[in-house]
Amino acid sequence: MRFLTDRKRATGLGSGRTGTHEHWKMMITSAALVVLVPLFVFTFGAGLGGTHEEVLAYFARPCPAIITALTAVVGVLHFKAEAVDAVVDYVHGVKGKLLIVAVEALAWVLIAAALLALVKLAL
């Protein structure tokens, strides 16, 4: 005879009530990346081949700097959402929670590093 409560039997099963929100977040970041990645490739390509001063002057303009910043932020946030989803699906318990914290921290460090590098390049 098993003495399991209703809550214990239902742990890990059923809706977490966040699926629609996560789906729309991924759809929006995916659509943004469909536009931003080609813009970034063309913008970055236009800055290639110049001297150091020319590249600094190019990224000091608002359009290339904004496109680069948006691509970095949206790309890393999209990566973070996918990585957290994979961790939730395949790693359970304390290890899973620690991995989620690590993925979140890595994502925010990458965003901060990208924006800091862009600010140093543009200023």
Image (cartoon, rainbow, N blue to C red):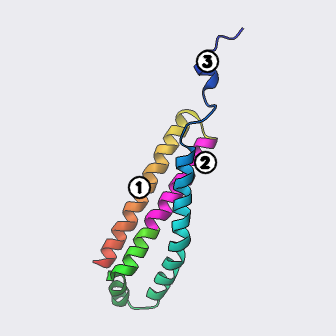
Amino acid type shown at disc 1: Trp
- Asked if residue 42 lies in the magenta stretch, the reply is no
Per the rendering, the mark at residue 6 is 3
Give the mark nearer the N terminus: 2 vs 1. Answer: 2
Q: Dot 2: within a 10 Å radius of its alpha carbon, few (fewer than 14), some, or many (20 or more) residues?
A: few
Q: Nearer the viewer, residue 99 or 70?
A: 70
Give the magenta part as a residue range. 72-89
Expressed as whole percent of the image width and height from the top left, the position of residue 95 reads 54, 37
Residue 84 showing in the rendered view: no
Expressed as whole percent of the image width and height from the top left, the position of residue 34 reads 56, 70
Vertical relation: 41 (above or below) 70: below
Q: Main secondary structure of the magenta part?
A: helix
Q: Quadrant of residue 30?
A: bottom right
**SS category of the residue bearing label 1:** helix
Amino acid type shown at disc 2: Ala
**SS category of the residue bearing label 2:** helix
Q: Dot 1: within a 10 Å radius of its alpha carbon, few (fewer than 14), some, or many (20 or more) residues?
A: some
C-alpha gap between disc 3 and disc 2 = 27 Å
Vertical relation: 25 (above or below) 1: below
Residue wearing tag 1: 108
Amino acid type shown at disc 3: Asp
Expressed as whole percent of the image width and height from the top left, the position of residue 71 reads 46, 69
Residue at horizontal 52%, vertical 59%? 78
Q: Marks 2 and 3: in contact by CB < 8 Å?
A: no
What is the count of numbered marks? 3
Q: Nearer the viewer, residue 63 or 18?
A: 18
- Asked if residue 83 lies in the magenta stretch, the reply is yes
Q: Nearer the viewer, residue 90 or 18?
A: 18
Observer-side mark, 3 or 2, equals: 3
Residue wearing tag 2: 86
